[in-house]
Structures are given as C-alpha cells and as structure tokens.
Image (spheres, helix red, strand yellow):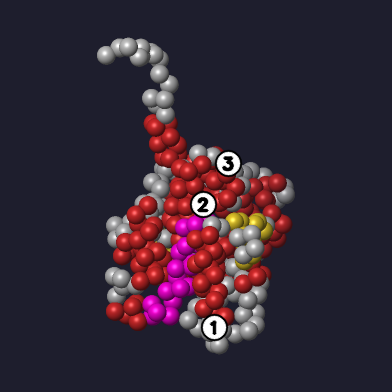
Amino acid sequence: MKTENYYQERNLRNLDRIERLLDDLPYFCEDFLRGVENRTSTLTRLNYCYDLRIFFDFLVGKKFRGKAVRDLTLEDLELVTEMDLEIFLSYLSNYKFGGKRLACDERAKARKLSTVRSLFKYFFNKGLIEVNITTKVATPKLHEKEIIRLDGDEVSAILDVAEEGSGLSAHADGYHEKTKVRDTAILTLFLGTGIRISELVGLNNESINFSDNSFIVTRKGGNQAILYFSEEVGDALAAYLAQKEEDPRVPKEEHALFLSLQYRRITVRAVENLVKKYAKIVSPLKKITPHKLRSTYGTSLYRETGDIYIVADVLGHKDVNTTRKHYAAITEDHRRSVAGAVKLHKKDENDE
C-alpha cells in the first residue's frame, strides 16, 4: 500500500468497511448514505453504519420480531414511535451485540440518537416518510467532563522519561534505545502544538518546513492548515529526521514522517500505546491519551494568552463555543484572579 497520501488511503479503507456493513443493513440505508455523502466525511458515514446496525438490531429484537434487518422497509420505519426511541435509549445502557455485553454512556447515546435523527430527517425531507418522530425525543443530558491534563512538572517529566527511559518495564526498556528519539519528537509535537493524533499520523517528511518552523496538517473534513512550532519542538523533530537519514533501513519511497519499528507509517494505535506507556510512569492516577496531551497544550496556551479565539484557531475548532466549553474551568480561574483588580476605596498614602 502506498503511504504518501495517508488520508486518501484511510478514506478508501473506510469506504470498503461501509460497503461491507451495508450488506447487513436495510436497503434504504445506502440511499441515505449517498444523500449525505457531499456534506459528511467517510469516517462520519462509517460511524453512521455502526450506529444504525445497533439501532436496527434493536428494532428486529423488540418491535419487528421475526423480521431480518435486511428486510426492514421505509414503511416499517414509519411504524417506529417516540416511545420506541425512548426504549432504545434505555436499552443502550445495557445491551448485547455480536455476543458481547455493552453499555453506552450519555455521549454515546446522544451520538446514536443523532444518527437516527439524521436518517429520519433525510427520508422525511425527501417525502418518503410522513412524520419525523425523532424531533420529539429529548437528547440525553450531557454533563461536563473535567479536563484531564498534565501539570507543568508532569509535562517536563514525561519528556524526560521518553528521553532517558527511567521507570520503563524491562520489556519496554529493550525497545527504548531504538524509539526514544522518535517518541520524544512525537510527545514534544503533541505538547508543543496541540496537534490531533490523526493529524500527527498523517504527517509526511515534506510536511515540515524548518525555514519558518511550520508544518501542514490535514484537519477534520480534509481542509489543510499551516501550524507553527517553537524552537524546542523544531529541535526534537530535527533530531528524529537526522536519525532517519542515517538509517539505511528506511525505505526511500516512504514519505511518512513517523515510522514504526517495521519502517512503515506509525498507526494511531501505536501512538496511543506509547503515550500511555510514558504517561503512566509520570502520572499513574490520570488516564492520559493523545487527546489529553492536546488539552494540556490548549490549557497552557489559554493561560498564556487569555485569548479563546487564538486557542480555537490553533486547535482547529470550527466553533469557538467548543473551545470555550472545554476550557470553561480556566475561564473561572481568570475570573477569580481579577476579582480584586478593581479597588473601590483609595487608601491614603499617609494612612498607617
């Protein structure tokens, strides 16, 4: 598989998965996915398929017993009631699928309801069903999640562990000499730019421009953006690129920036595992993921600038309210810090 265009290859893989999943869904789902294709990513449509698979499995188990999922029709869809959808949301708290016992939290329930709403809305707007009952069903209340991030000392510590290998298990320590420069570059890039894991994995050698310390990332939706990095991040990237240039085993045709030990583009799973490996040494009580490293950067940037719009732009949030929601706790810190800034009574210099 050619890897110079990571996103194109990922989209092709998603399309293959969608095609396979459609074999187990009602015929009208293909019409729905085609109808939303121009305004959704392949990943969004793939997630629609996963969610609809669970929804229709629920329907044939609870409402249309004796029918196969593939045999469901739009006429059956019109028979679904508001009560059915409320039962479905309750069902998601504890259900079986594919022989496994599963449970959805409030966000997973909200996403699945959103998928079902999109399906009903599409066919209602097309005039193929008469009523869109999903508008009557309340979205599960979403509670704000605490921002989990590394503190200042922990940021320094995780980079030290990546560089030195202290605290690693004997098994992990055996690979450390081969991966420490790469891993340090990956962690430094996360913590120094707030890059998403998909953006990091998709970077190519030619994405980096050291003349102005910038790099090109492909954002959600496929749009490209230029981000900038500090000298510290640049030093870590330069050290890794120098190591790659000296390694004769790196394939000449491989464009990927970050490589696995097999000299192929590193995977999302591998990056998640290396972050977990180092983070549990410096912060064993926190569940640190690549996204939490992104939150760590976002928090630090907001504390330094106090500008929510800059943070939103750098992190690639389309809506500044998304950023404001995630960093509301930091906003509270700012409010508290300025509470005594305005003095109401001037104290006379001669007062004792």
State the image quarter where residue 12 is shown. Answer: bottom right
Q: Nearer the viewer, mark 2 or mark 3?
A: 3
Identify the residue position indicated by label 2 in the image.
Answer: 111
Q: Dot 2: what SS?
A: helix
Q: Dot 1: what SS?
A: helix
Q: Amino acid at mark 3?
A: Tyr
Between the C-alphas of marks 1 and 3, the distance is 42 Å
Q: Amino acid at mark 1?
A: Glu
Q: Residue furthest left?
A: 352
- Image coordinates for residue 142, horizontal then vertical, percent: 44, 43
Q: Residue at x 69, y 59 (%)?
A: 37
In this picture, is 61 found above or below 106? below
275 displayed left or right of 125: left
Q: Is residue 5 visible?
A: yes
Q: Nearer the viewer, mark 1 or mark 3?
A: 1
Identify the residue position indicated by label 3 in the image.
Answer: 309
Over which residues does the magenta segment extend? 175-194
Is 333 one of the magenta-colored residues?
A: no
170 displayed left or right of 273: left
- Image coordinates for residue 93, horizontal then vertical, percent: 39, 53
Q: Amino acid at mark 2?
A: Arg
- Image coordinates for residue 305, horizontal then vertical, percent: 51, 42
> Secondary structure of the magenta portion, mostly?
helix
- Residue 246: assigned label: 1
Between the C-alphas of marks 1 and 2, the distance is 47 Å
Between the C-alphas of marks 2 and 3, the distance is 27 Å
Q: Dot 3: what SS?
A: helix
